[in-house]
Amino acid sequence: MRTFQLSDARSLPLLQRPITLLFLMGMALPISFATWSALLNNFVIEVADFDGADIGWLHTVREIPGFFAIGVIAILMFMREQVLGIVALIMLGVATALTAYFPSMGGILTLTMLSSIGFHYFETVNQSLQLQWIDKARAPQMLGWLVAAGSGATLVAYVLIVLTWKTYDLSYAFVYMTAGGITTGIAIFAYFAYPQFETPHPQHKTLILRKRYWLYYALQFMSGARRQIFVVFAGFMMVELFGLEVHEITQLYLINLVINIIFAPLMGRLVSVFGERRALLFEYAGLMLVFLAYGGVYYFGWGVLFAAFLYVVDHIFFALALALKTYFQKIADPQDIAPTAAVAFTINHIAAVFLPAALGYLWLTSPAAVFFLAAGMAGVSFGLALLIPRHPAPGYETRLQPPVVAAE
């Protein structure tokens, strides 16, 4: 297989350059994962008769591979990052394609585990490749465009679901098989169509934990805990409380995608202009208000339209999460990016392993309390983000230290 130095890749045709591969893989992943997510709540309620505790356990199982994303470091000892990303995509696609053929609790949990390994290992590698292959000066804007591209690919899938689900009486098996097959096909194409790209900074292949990255680790932990509550329970609420059907949930996702396509590049520009600190403070303050309002949906009986509005606003704020990536890119040693991406994913998923199952039982007692807890987590994140410098750099990772050269 051909190998190109990253600096020489500019001589390749545009369609074979590293950034094009990032866009291609970034669009392949959500075709499977977003389709799986869009149908999941209806599938498990209608076919497998899940309740709040069951869905909590499913998402706990789904997040276990994220907790063990640190295993990527071991795999990179004998496999290139680029190849591992493609293998992970294939695993996600195949597991998604088979989801509807195993509608029991055990079957769903098994395939969820397999697809999650593919998803989390790809996301770990993809984040690492993005930070290695994209110049720091262009990173915020380019990461925004990558988010928009993924949203665009998902938009096409969701439009097809909305237009065809009821019209042609589609089955869960057909939709899952189609989405998983497309992801698998794109991954196989990417393996054969692109050369291997060598970066100028060989990555460490051992566990990297540095004290000077502590704030990044803390923000990753809080982000994972807070986001789990949204991913697991916001969509579940729309089905359980308001009885939304597959095509209605998908229409809500479509609105989010259109907004992401428009706003994600703008969010990248916002981070570039105002810096990571202000962008993250804005995100966390907004999320506090959104989660408090989610709780109000239960306490005050606010209707489905208000809940749907909150769901959309939630996604807009989450688009600012790219600021956490660029913050790390600015403070990291270049050789630390791959192993730290794996460590960060594991830290991000520590709470994800136990929170969904534990909060699934709290949900049975008080759904509003689940969202109030998320608001508190957003408040903790806000406090941590106050420590990010206006211009972070190695040796100036937090405002608690003077801007000097890094010293381990």
Image (spheres, rainbow, N blue to C red):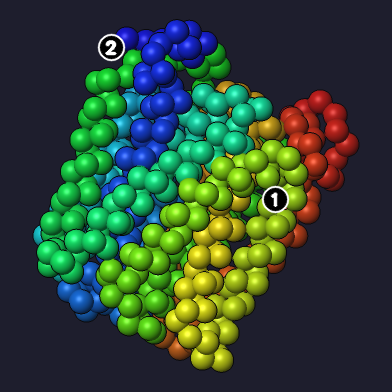
Question: Three-letter amino acid code at disc 2?
Answer: Met
**Which of pointers 2 and 1 lies earlier in the amino acid sequence?**
2
> Is any part of residue 377 visible from this angle?
no
In the image, is residue 324 above or below residue 61?
Answer: above
Foreground pick, 391 / 59: 391
**Mark carried by residue 392:** none
Residue 285: % across, % down:
70, 64
Judging by the rendered image, the residue that carries numbered circle 1 is 279
Residue at the image position 57 percent from the left and 84 percent from the top: 296
Quadrant in the picture for the C terminus: top right
Q: Secondary structure at mark 1?
A: helix
Residue 251: % across, % down:
35, 66
In this picture, residue 214 sits left or right of residue 157: right
Foreground pick, 21 / 361: 21
Residue 72: % across, % down:
41, 35
Judging by the rendered image, the residue that carries numbered circle 2 is 1
In this picture, residue 47 sits left or right of residue 305: left
- Within 10 Å of disc 2 (Cα), the crowding (few <14, some 14-19, many 20+) is few
Q: CA distance from mark 2 to mark 1?
A: 42 Å
Badge 2 vs badge 1, beta-carbon distance below 8 Å: no
Quadrant in the picture for the N terminus: top left
- Within 10 Å of disc 1 (Cα), the crowding (few <14, some 14-19, many 20+) is many
In the image, is residue 68 above or below residue 133?
Answer: below
Toward the bottom, the furthest residue is 300
Foreground pick, 9 / 211: 9
Residue 23: % across, % down:
41, 33
Residue at the image position 32 percent from the left and 19 percent from the top: 194
In this picture, residue 374 sits left or right of residue 171: right
Residue at the image position 15 percent from the left and 66 percent from the top: 167
Q: Secondary structure at mark 2?
A: loop
